[in-house]
Amino acid sequence: MKTHDKIIELLKTQGPLTAKVLASELSLTTMGIRQHMLALEESGELTFKDEKATRGRPTRYWSLTEKSNSHFANRHDELTVQLIDSVIAVFGDDGLEKLIANREKSSMRAYRLALADRYGVEEKLITLVKLRSDEGYMATMTQEDGFYWLLENHCPICAAATKCVNFCRSELHLFQNLLEDVATVTREEHIIEGARRCAYKVIPF
C-alpha cells in the first residue's frame, strides 16, 4: 500500500492526527510525512486545524475532506438498483412511475425558477449547463450553424437509468418542456446505449 493510502486509511479509522503521530505509526520521519501531507492537501484530500496547546505553538491536526471518499468502497449504485427493485416489489410499476414523475415535477419547478429571468435559447442553455454541472452531469454547450448542443459528459444517475430507462425519458421530457417556447430538443447520443456522453440537439424556432 502506498504511503498516501496508508495516511488516508489511518485518518479514516482514527480521526484527526498530528504529523508526529502519523510519522510514528508509519515509521517515517516527521519531515518525510509532512511532504506526503502537503501533497494530499494540494490534491484537496486533506485539511488541517490548529488547536491551542497548553504551552508553545498550536498543534496541527490533519483530517480528511469529502474528496478522500473516492478511496473507499462506494455502493451507491448497488443501493440505487436495490431501491428501484423494492419500489417495484412493494408498489408495482405504477409506483415507480409515480416516483419518477414526482422527481421530474420537483426538478421542473426548481429549473423553471432558475430560468425565469432568462430569455432566448442561449441564455437559457447557459443557465441549464450550470444547473446540470452542479448536479454532477459535467455539462457543456456548443453552438453550430443554426443549432446548439447540450452535452452531458457524465451521468450521476447511470445505475438508476440503466435499471429503468424511464429516468432518461424523464430527463429528455424535462429539457423539452423547459425550452418548449424557444426550441425543439432531441437526444442524439445516449450514455446507457454505449455512447461516451448524452448529447441533446437544441434547434431554435
Image (spheres, grey):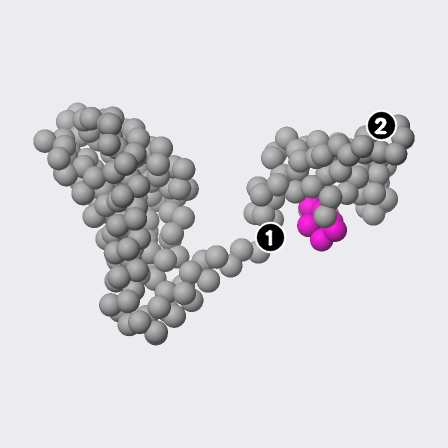
Tell me if I can see residue 138 in this picture: no
| Residue linked to disc 2 | 57
Work out whether 109 lies above or below 167: above
| Residue linked to disc 1 | 72
Q: The residue tagged with tag 1: helix, strand or loop? A: loop
Q: Earlier in the sequence, mark 2 or mark 1?
A: 2
Residue drawn 69% across the image and 46% down it: 8
- Indicate the quadrant where residue 83 lies: bottom left
* Residue 9, horizontal then vertical, whole percent: 70, 50
Question: Residue 179 vs residue 161: left or right?
Answer: left
Residue drawn 53% across the image and 55% down it: 74
* Residue 35, horizontal then vertical, whole percent: 75, 32
Q: Amino acid at mark 1?
A: Phe
Magenta highlight range: 7-14
Badge 2 local density, few (<14 within 10 Å), some, or many (20+)? few
Disc 2 to disc 1: CB gap under 8 Å: no
**Along the line of sight, which residue is nearer the eye, 121 or 162?**
121
Question: Residue 93 vs residue 132: left or right?
Answer: left
Residue drawn 14% across the image and 38% down it: 180
Q: Amino acid at mark 2?
A: Arg
Magenta part, dominant SS: helix
Q: CA distance from mark 2 to mark 1?
A: 34 Å
